[in-house]
Every structure is written in C-alpha cells, then in structure tokens.
Amino acid sequence: MHMPTVSIVLPCYNGARFLATSLDSILAQTFSDWELIIVNDCSSDPSPQIATEYADRDTRIRVIHNTKNLKLPGSLNVGFDVARGRYLTWTSDDNIAKDNWLATLVEYLNAHPETDMVCADMDLIDEDANVYGVLSDECARTVTELAYKSNVGAAFMYRKSAADRVGKYDDVMFCAEDYDYWVRIALSGRLDYIPDNIYLYRQNPASLTATQQPRIWAKTAAIKTKYHTRWRDRLNLGWWDRQKLAYLCRNPYPRAEFSLVGIRHILGRQLVGLVFFWNAKLRRHIKSKLEIKLQ
C-alpha cells in the first residue's frame, strides 16, 4: 500500500454549500502525493453525497461517516487515527487552498528537519470569496505572540512525530481545540512562521467561528491559563510580558490586543501597592531587594 507524504483531514458537518469548492482546491494542488480523509460528522444536508462522489472519482480520497456527532476535535481525531502520511494537516469545508498550499509547506518541512510545524499567511475572504484582509495584518506572527492569542491561521502542516508526541485534539477544548494543539506543539518543539500567502480563509456566518464566539473566548482564556507557567518559563518573559499574559488569562472577552484597559489594570495594582508602601512587609521586601536600610 502506498504511503502518501501528506495526510489531509477534512471534518464536515452540514458543509454542502462550499464543500465542492474546497475539494476542488485540493484536487488542483501542484503537489500530488497526498491522501484526503473526509470525516462526515452526521451531516443532514447533501455533504455525504458530495464527499462520496469525489471519493468515487479519485482514489486518494476516502470518506468516514461518524455514527454519532463527535464535533470538530473528535472528528479530527477520527481522521488522524487512520492517516498514513508523515506530514499532517487539515482544512475546512468552507475554505479554499491555493494551488501551492501543500507544495510550500512540504518544501519547508523537507528543508528544515528541526521544525515540528510550519504555518503560512492567508487571505481573509467573505461569503462570496472577496478578499478583504490578510492574516499578517491582523496579528503578529511569532511564537511569543502565540502565548497571548491564536495566530497560526489555517495554513499549516506538522510532522507525524510531533502529533505522536503531543497526542490527540482535546474534546474539552471544543471551539479552541486548534489553539490548544498549536500551543502544545510549540511548547514541546519548534513552530515556524513563513510569509507565503497560500490559503483563503472564509468568514462564513454559519461557521463555528461566527456562531460560537463566547465559547471560543472562554476556551481561549482557559488555554492561556493552563499553559501560563510553561510559557513564562519557555520564553523567559520579563515583568511586563508576564503582566500582559496574566491579564489576558483573567479576561476571556475579547480584548485580543493588550489595550489601555489592561495597562490601566496593571498600573492600578501597582498604585495600590504604593499607597501601602510603608507597611512592614513591603519595607522588609524592599530592604532585601535593594539592601538598604529604610528609615
């Protein structure tokens, strides 16, 4: 049995509206050594029929039908459990891969054996596929920034060895399971960002991103809190960045950037300390730090 270089998982739940467009973009890839595993998560629309039609046309495509609705993390785990590639990625039923999507990511991982995961830039499109933005204009794309917010995007690839190391997608983190997974890879290995724009991410009003914002914010805050100490130690964060991360952990709704509210919060805490500066505990603390005798 042929072992493909890349395994692509495509979870689908009632995604018939854009599914064919997404599948066509995969078939148009310049890199052809891939397998596609479509996981139908109990769809009630024509998605299963569309998926089956494509599988009948191309032997690289197979379809798995869940017997119960497992939601996104569960469906990803079902797909990757049977994946055979040494490189792994997944896509969505409403997004579009540019024709160099796989080639760019495979080439980078081949050239950088020390890298566990790579992610690229992407265009942001509306329902009608009109481009209205670029991911790199929305957020800083560095590992340090990943401690504060999900900045990987939807154009990524990681090694099977990294997946074996960090384990499965976490069902408990539904709606932010991808962010949790990227953090686990970054904290246990190496994640690289590249500037190549190779993907189209659709803002679909029926998507989880659009319909589950409160849950996404809450889960994102839980992930920041969960890994707070490990990020602090891994990145050797200074005082200001430690305060920034602590603030974002405590505030799930949705100040993606460290705003004036956060700054005011931290400075307010410091001013409270100054008001009570001359109590005995602080006096001893200052004395021990500065090695001076306070009168």
Image (spheres, rainbow, N blue to C red):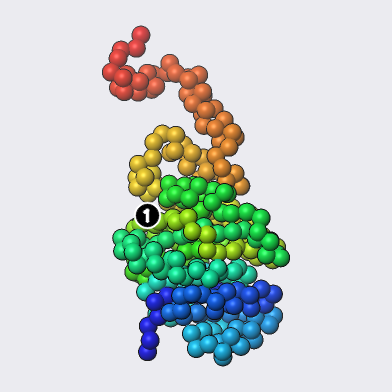
Residue 6 rendering spot, x and y as whole percentages: 42, 75
- Amino acid type assigned to the residue bearing label 1 in the image: Leu
Q: Which residue appears at 58% of the width and 85% of the height?
A: 54
- Determine whether, in the image, residue 279 is placed left or right of residue 200: left
Q: Which residue appears at 49% of the width and 59% of the height?
A: 196
**Residue 211 in view, yes or no:** no
Residue 171 rendering spot, x and y as whole percentages: 51, 67
Residue 223 rendering spot, x and y as whole percentages: 48, 53
- Determine whether, in the image, residue 105 is placed left or right of residue 64: left
The N terminus lies in which quarter of the figure?
bottom left
Q: Is residue 240 above or below residue 73?
A: above
Q: Is residue 164 above or below residue 137?
A: below
According to the image, label 1 marks what residue?
187
Q: Which residue appears at 51% of the width and 50% of the height?
A: 149
**Front residue (pair 89, 48):** 89
Location of residue 255 by image quarter: top right
**Front residue (pair 266, 186):** 186
